[in-house]
Image (spheres, rainbow, N blue to C red):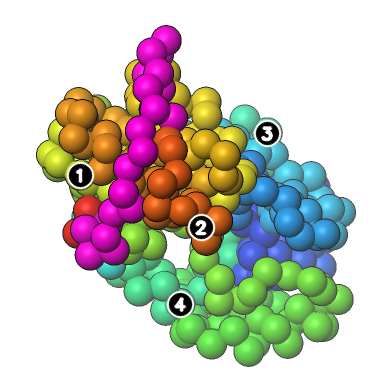
């Protein structure tokens, strides 16, 4: 194959996309990696917000995969109003949680096609496997995605190529179809065998996922926001808060966000303006933010919940500092019963 052929590979850093890139590089294709920052990647969120308790740092998996394969990777930030519309009003609906996978793919593939044209590449490829994901990786939705993203046959799925109709790169001889894969289904056995053959080691869990939107707990938080704040008011700042800590709906107009560990507490500090901030005195406890219009009784009960989550060193008489802008008061609440906490939990 001619080394003048260049392809853009959507690289997540997972096993499938890494193998797809290696498979094409073996054919002499010049690969330019591309990854998107959506604001909903679990690993990227943990890398930015969690306390570093492990010796091994949390790295961006796409960039790490690019380094292992010795290929350049471009990261494009697509988080923002246009992408949020994919979440709030998906044409093809949600999956099992609030995951608009088909609309998300269409959005990403359109942007990737634009990038492909910008850098003068001939085609695009992904690590998708036919039948692996129930919403977006079946034959019918794949066809819908290709059509709506206006890819014109320029998207190759190397791992399942022999199970799919030939694409432009195959028809034009840019890639050898016989050297592509025929993988189908949810088993990762063939991918792991290829990883061993290609010398790809230390890859993320093959069956792992990296999107908050597929998590049903996060989905409940999003739907709670839609109900009480309105879809049209969702911003990326709201999304960041929805990903952090424990969430409770005390009343229709009062919501609580509580940090679970030091990293989350520090992260929440930057969202204090315009919100009540509660913290235990003398004992280590969570940072608690209160949104809306809490009454004095609401604040006392939320202070009691803050004490409850302060841990074993917090006695029933622990004090809680309540701050709002320049004002501060101190409360000595009783810990809230677990049954009440569960009733409020989102």
Q: Earlier in the sequence, mark 4 or mark 1?
A: 4
The residue singled out by tag 2 in the image is: 311
Q: Are marks 3 and 4 in contact (CB under 8 Å)?
A: no
Q: Earlier in the sequence, mark 3 or mark 4?
A: 3
Dot 4: few (<14), some (14–19), or many (≥20) neighbours within 10 Å?
Answer: some
Q: Residue at x 22, y 46 (%)?
A: 249
Lateral position of residue 259 relative to residue 35, left or right:
left
The boundaries of the magenta stretch are: 321-341
Q: Residue at x 70, y 83 (%)?
A: 192
Q: Nearer the viewer, mark 1 or mark 3?
A: 1
Q: Residue furthest top?
A: 326
Quarter occupied by the N terminus: bottom right
Residue 119 circle label = 3
Q: CA distance from mark 4 to mark 1?
A: 40 Å
Q: CA distance from mark 3 to mark 4?
A: 31 Å
> Does dot 1 land on a helix, a strand or a loop?
strand
In percent of width and height, residue 177 lies at: 64, 74
The residue singled out by tag 4 in the image is: 132
Q: Are marks 3 and 2 in contact (CB under 8 Å)?
A: no
Q: Earlier in the sequence, mark 4 or mark 2?
A: 4
> Does dot 4 land on a helix, a strand or a loop?
loop
Would you say residue 285 is visible in this rendering? yes
In percent of width and height, residue 211 lies at: 47, 56
Q: CA distance from mark 4 to mark 2?
A: 42 Å
The residue singled out by tag 1 in the image is: 250
Q: CA distance from mark 3 to mark 2?
A: 55 Å
Q: Earlier in the sequence, mark 1 or mark 3?
A: 3
Lateral position of residue 83 relative to residue 116, left or right:
left
Q: Nearer the viewer, residue 214 or 246?
A: 246
């Amino acid at each position: 194959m001619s080394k003048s052929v260049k392809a853009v590979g959507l690289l997540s850093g997972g096993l499938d996309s890494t193998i797809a890139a290696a498979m094409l590089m073996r054919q002499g294709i010049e690969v330019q990696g591309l990854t998107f920052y959506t604001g909903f990647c679990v690993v990227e969120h943990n890398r930015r917000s969690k306390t570093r308790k492990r010796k091994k740092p949390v790295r961006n998996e796409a960039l790490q995969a690019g380094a292992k394969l010795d290929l350049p990777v471009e990261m494009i930030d697509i988080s923002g109003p246009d992408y949020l519309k994919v979440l709030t009003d998906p044409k093809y609906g949600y999956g099992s949680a609030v995951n608009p996978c088909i609309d998300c793919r269409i959005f990403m593939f359109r942007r990737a096609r634009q990038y492909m044209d910008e850098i003068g590449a001939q085609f695009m490829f992904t690590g998708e496997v036919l039948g692996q994901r129930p919403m977006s990786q079946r034959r019918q939705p794949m066809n819908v995605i290709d059509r709506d993203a206006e890819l014109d046959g320029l998207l190759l799925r190397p791992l399942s190529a022999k199970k799919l109709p030939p694409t432009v790169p195959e028809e034009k001889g840019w890639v050898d179809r016989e050297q592509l894969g025929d993988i189908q289904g949810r088993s990762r056995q063939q991918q792991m065998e290829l990883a061993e053959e290609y010398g790809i080691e230390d890859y993320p869990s093959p069956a792992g996922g990296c999107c908050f939107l597929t998590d049903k707990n996060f989905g409940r938080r999003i739907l709670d926001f839609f109900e009480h704040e309105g879809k049209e008011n969702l911003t990326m700042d709201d999304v960041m808060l929805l990903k952090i800590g424990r969430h409770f709906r005390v009343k229709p107009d009062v919501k609580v966000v509580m940090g679970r560990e030091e990293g989350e507490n520090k992260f929440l500090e930057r969202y204090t303006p315009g919100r009540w901030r509660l913290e235990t005195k003398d004992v280590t406890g969570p940072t608690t933010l209160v949104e809306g219009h809490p009454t004095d009784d609401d604040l006392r009960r939320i202070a009691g919940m803050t004490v409850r989550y302060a841990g074993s060193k917090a006695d029933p008489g622990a004090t809680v500092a309540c701050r709002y802008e320049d004002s501060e008061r101190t409360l000595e609440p009783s810990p809230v019963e677990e049954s009440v906490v569960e009733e409020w939990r989102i």
